[in-house]
Image (tube, rainbow, N blue to C red):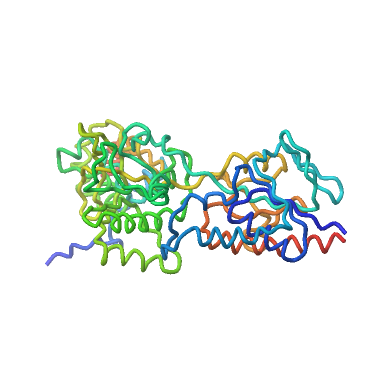
Amino acid sequence: MDDRSIDIDHNDQKIMAFLTLQDPSINTCIGCGSCTATCSAGHFVDFNIRKVHTFLRRGETHLLKQEIQKCMFCGKCQLVCPRGVNLRNLIISIYNAIERLA
Amino acid sequence: MPREVIVIGAGVAGMTAASLLSETGIKVKLLEKEKQLGGHLRKWDRLFPTLRPASEVLDWIEKGVNANIEVFKEVTVTDIRVQGNEFTVSIKDKDPITGNAIVLATGFDLFDAVKKEEYGYGIYNNVITSADLEAIFREKKKIVTTSGKIPRRIGIVHCVGSRDEKVGNLYCSKVCCVTGVKQAIEIKQALPDAEVYGFYMDLRMFDRNFEELYFEAQQKWGINFIRGRVSECAENEDESILVKTEDTLTGRPLKMTVDLLILLVGFVPSPETRKLASILGLKTGNDGFLLSKDEHTQDNITSVPGVFLTGALKGPTTIVNSIADARATALQVQIFLNSVN
C-alpha cells in the first residue's frame, strides 16, 4: 500500500525555497484561515488557498499547478492576512516558479 | 530625609505600589486622571479564571490606599522635571507636585474596535466588544439584541486588534482568550438555551486554571470552538450578523448567522503612557509599550534614576501579575530612596 503521509524527508522543497527568497513574508503564515474564509473563488469551487499554501510549505506540490489556476486574483486574501503575507503576489510568483522549476 | 514618592496612575498597579510604599512609612502622592480610582478594574464584573467578583479585588486594593496617601484626582500631567534629588510634576490648572521618586503606572487602553471595520463595530448594531458585555454583566442588564429579543446564537471573535499586522499590532494581548472562554460561560449561565461559538486562531490558556476553564466550557457548558479567524461580517435584513470564517480543522469555509457578536478587544498603549515616555525620554518597544532597563533582572527600573515602571504600561498583563509587579516596584523604590540618603 502507498504511504500517504507527508514525507518531509523526501518532499520537494525547491519551489518553496525559490519563493521564500523573493518574499520572506510567506514564511510567517500561521494557518489562521482568514484567506480561505474571504476567498471569492473558494466559496464556489473546491479551492482552499490556506491548504494549498500549507501543502506548498510541506513540499507537496504535485497538485499546485492545477489548484492555483482557480484563483481569481481578487486580492482579498492579502487584504485580510494578519501576518502580512503577500498572498496575491505569492500566487503570481507561484506561476513563475512552476514555469521555471516544475 | 527625602522620602516622598509620586505614583502616576491609580489602577491596579498604581494603587498596589502606593499602598505598599505607604505601609513602609514613605509619603505617597497618588495621581489619577479620572474622577475615581481603580482604572479598568472598575469596569469588570467577574474575573478569570475563577469568576470571582472584581469588586472583591478592587475593595482590597482600595483599602490599601489609606489616609496617609495624598490622592489627586482628575489630574493631567503636563511636564516632569528633575533637579538633584527632587522631581517636579506639573499638573494642568493645579499646583505642581514634588517628590524624590516617580512610579509610572499609567496602564493601557482597549483597542478601538471601530478600526476593524470588517467586523462591523459601530456599523452593525448587534456587534459589541467584550468590554461592552462586561458592562452588561456588571450593571445586571439583560443580554438582548438591539430589537430587544433574546439572542439564540452568540458568536465570540478572538484576537480583535491583536496579532494583526493590518492594524499595526503584532503582539498578542494575552488575556483575551481566557476572557472569551470566561464570557462564553457567563453567557451560558445567563442564557442556558443559547448556542455560543468562539472563533479563534489559538486558545492561549497559559496560566493556572485556564486550561481547566476551557475544559469546563466544553464539557459542562457545551460551548462550541471553531478554529478559524473571522475574515469579515455582514448584516442580514433582520440585523443579525453573518460571520465568515474558515473551519480550518475540516478545511472548509464556514459561515453562520449569530444574533449577537462579541469582539475580544486587546490592549494598546495609552496615550498618557506615550506622552510621559516622551517627556522623560523613556524608550518604547516596537509594540509601543514602555521598555524597562532589563526585562528579566530590572523590569521596574528605567534609564532615568528615580523613575520606575509598573503594570500594563509595559505590555499586556493580568491583574495577578500587575499586583505582583507593583509590589516588586515598591521594594525597588525603597532601595533607591535608601541609597540616595
Q: Is residue B58 left or right of residue A10?
A: right
Specify the quadrant of the image occupied by residue B301. Answer: bottom right
Residue A90, compared with residue B190, is above or below; it is above
Left or right side of B66 for B263: left
Q: Position of residue B243 (x, y in %)?
A: 25, 41
Residue B238: percent from the left, percent from the top? Answer: 20, 34
Q: Quadrant of the N terminus of chain A?
A: bottom left
- Count of marks, rendered view: 0
Residue under the point 53% across and 44% down? B109
Q: Is residue B261 above or below residue B205?
A: above
Rendered view: B158 above or below B295 = above
- Left or right: residue B275 versus residue B116 is right
Residue A71 drawn at (x, y percent):
23, 36
Q: Residue at x 66, y 59 (%)?
A: B17
Q: Quick one: B258 or B54, which is closer to the camera?
A: B54
Name the quarter where the C terminus of chain A is drawn: top left
> Residue B214 or A24: which is nearer the viewer?
B214
Give residue B114's position: percent from left, percent from top.
Answer: 41, 35
Q: Is B91 on the left or on the right of B188, as rendered? A: right
Is there any visible trace of residue A24 in the rendered image?
A: no
Q: Is residue B207 above or below residue B304?
A: below
Question: B251 or B235: nearer the eye?
Answer: B235
**Residue B26 visible in the picture:** yes
